[in-house]
Amino acid sequence: MDEVTAQAPEVRGDGFEGQRFYVVPRPVAREALQAPATSRLLVTDAGFFPHAARHGRERTAGVGQHILLVCADGSGWCSTREDRYEIQAGDAVLLQAGVPHAYGASPDRPWTLWWFHFAGTDAADLVAAARAVAGGPVSHLREHAPIARLIAAIIDSLSSGTSGGLISASGAAWNALAQIIASGRRSPGSALSPAERAVEHLRASAPHRTPVEDLAAMVGLSSSQFAAVFREHAGVPPLRYQTNLRMAMARDLLDGTDRSVAAVAQECGYEDALYFSRQFARVHGLSPSAYRGRTR
């Protein structure tokens, strides 16, 4: 939300020549997060910082939205509770909402950065999917230019100051995040962390539920240690992550088949269709029938 300048003592306070950015007024953002067309994914801020010397941020309590950073040129760094990462041109960084982090441009080759902040009911799932592919917050993109073009379109859409612009920006953000999930990859030769191993197991075994104690034993950690590292990695607790996997499966079945709600519930691991409907409505704000009917 506050990408304009860094807070470090060496911050450049007058911005960066050629920069572009837009911040959605907070009352507008709050209202848009309640609207059906933008409740699942909403871009709240977006920008472009070329050759951003001395740019950086340190947020000891995180920030209220998820953040995507795409390095188009130069280099920089990023640190989370997991590790410190060197960022090069072609890298995308996804930072989870509410998680402490810091990042900055390299002093000798300051990065050119495209970025946006986003929120919504599906935002955490998209971040978790990208992190699972990349093995952490940094995705090494096969081609970053299409993502940069989408972020440029997001800035243009937000700058219109209209509800249609918000919807258009949401669509471009979906496209950008989907491309990162589809084309991003982990660093060559990197080993899976305990949280990544757990995520791979959960994705392979969904919709079957695995108790947290079993997941912890599987990766050689205590339950409390595992819960902490898993949340750091996936952005949500293990049980919530498993529910999100089930709900993603449910959305696919409701969108792509004519199976009854009861049949969808069974296939997603819920014996009780009423309980499934309550869980679905809690996550999506709509009952399964209403969700299916929104496009029919």
Image: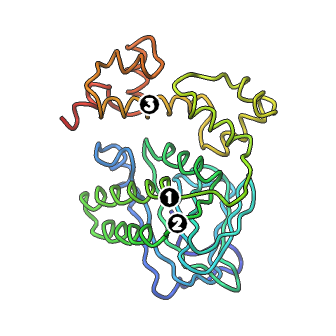
Tag 3 or tag 1, which sits nearer the N-term?
1
Percent x, y of residue 235: 60, 43
In the image, residue 278 sits, relative to residue 62, either above or below, namely: above
- Give the CA separation, mark 1 to mark 3: 24 Å
Other residues around mark 1 within 10 Å, as few (<14) / some (14–19) / many (≥20): some
Q: Which mark is residue 142?
A: 2
- Callout 1, which amino acid? Ser
Report the side of 239 relative to 163 (left or right). Answer: right
Element on which disc 1 rests: helix
Residue 74 image point, x, y percent: 61, 81
Residues at discs 2 and 1 in contact (Cβ within 8 Å):
yes
- Name the residue at 34% across, 15% down: 262
Q: Residues within 10 Å of mark 3 (few under 14, many from 20)?
A: many
Q: Earlier in the sequence, mark 3 or mark 2?
A: 2
Decide: is 63 above or below 289: below
Q: Nearer the viewer, residue 201 or 230?
A: 201
Residue at mark 2 to residue at mark 1: CA–CA distance? 6 Å
- Judge left or right: residue 227 versus residue 258: right
Q: In the displayed image of the protein, which residue is found farthest to the top?
A: 272
Query: What amino acid type is highlighted by mark number 2?
Result: Arg
Left or right, 47 with reference to 264: right
SS state under label 3: helix
Q: Which mark is residue 288?
A: none
Q: Residues within 10 Å of mark 2 (few under 14, many from 20)?
A: few
Mark 2 residue element: loop
Measured Cα–Cα span from mark 3 to mark 2 = 30 Å
Query: Which residue is disc 3 drawn over?
Result: 247
Residue tagged 1: 183
Q: x%, y% of residue 216?
A: 75, 29
